[in-house]
Amino acid sequence: MELESILLPGVDAKRPLVIAGPCSVETEDQVMNTAKQLSSRGIKIFRSGIWKPRTKPGGFEGVGTIGLPWLKEVKKETGMYVATEVATALHVYEALKAGIDMLWIGARTTANPFAVQEVADALKGVDIPVLIKNPVNPDLELWIGALERIHNAGLKKLGVIHRGFSSYDKKIYRNLPQWHIPIELRRRIPNVPIICDPSHIGGKRELIASISQQAMDLNFDGLIIESHCNPDAAWSDASQQITPEVLEYIINLLVIRNETQTTEDLQTLRKQIDECDNNLIEELSKRMRIAREIGTYKKEHNMPILQTGRYTEILDKYGVLGEQCGMDSEFIKKVFEAIHEESVRQQAVIINK
């Protein structure tokens, strides 16, 4: 996929690119007050929602088009670029008419190919940076599909926003990071800029700093953070917004590590990793050979493939052993679940011959 830089003129190319502003446009005073505080701290791109898709009806759903002139005033007064979310063709037309500099497509919209296509059609012939949030559920193909739809409309200044994935069982995070998904996206599309949204991943302002650091450690390109002049009084998502002062503090604390390392020590360690991986493949191959022999035995003795008691015993036993070896028990269980699934598949081939 041929992509161009999403950086706007005058915006520093160093990591992280920071996009900040309130969750929602509420009043003209709120917008301008926040923007001036952010601008004075070096933020170049001001973000805020004009139209707010809510999970349930009855909540604040944005001021609508009456807020667009307030964003134009932000540009005029501060010189900042302005960005907002679009979900329909009408949103696109109104945003472009108002001179919005950058657009993003929200998670709920990304999950709907019909909606993404409508936005893509409205953007044909436009040269503007567009960021695409991951879909609500962990579906990489859907995320890539949204990118492709916008790209096929002729847009090249594209990036993605990682805002985490919804989960019924909410614990620490509002939306589970599942970092492996944006990592796989980068493997598939190496030149796509990835912006992390720690506000929506964490759901609590106390988590923004740590999530931002983790995004930088994973070599993400930037951060989009909700910042409000008076967060506790915000009309939407108050608990995950921070003041411009706190934002500046968090950004200054970030440790930005070099993207590449070429030291001999690192090369030596990577060779050790390669050797371990080769050994893993050999051991797994040996395990699957034994699994096929078990499949033959079960076929000869008319036994079912799945032995539930044995499977549970394996998961429990190696989960504990993994913890004793310094690994997360859930990680070990996932590994053995995958191994068990392949063992069952191989035994099924034997039994059904």
Image: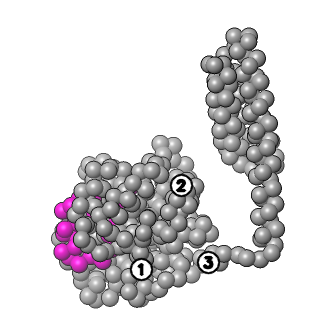
How packed is label 2: few (under 14 Cα within 10 Å), some, or many (20 or more)?
A: some
**Residues at marks 2 and 3, CA–CA distance in whole angstroms:** 22 Å
Which residue corresponds to mark 1?
Answer: 7
Residue contact at pointers 2 and 1, CB within 8 angstroms:
no
Residue 94: say if magenta.
yes
- The amino acid beneath tag 1 is Leu
Which residue corresponds to mark 3?
Answer: 256
- The amino acid beneath tag 2 is Ile
Q: Nearer the viewer, residue 114 or 191?
A: 191
Q: Secondary structure at mark 2?
A: helix
Residue pictured at 21% horizontal, 61% vertical: 89
Give residue 181's mark: 2
Front disc: 2 or 3? 2
**Residues at marks 3 and 1, CA–CA distance in whole angstroms:** 19 Å
Residue pictured at 50% horizontal, 80% vertical: 248
Residue 228: say if magenta.
no
Q: Is residue 91 left or right of residue 312?
A: left
Which residues fall within the magenta stretch? 86-107
- The amino acid beneath tag 3 is Ile
Residue pictured at 52% horizontal, 52% vertical: 176
Picture quarter containing residue 128? bottom left
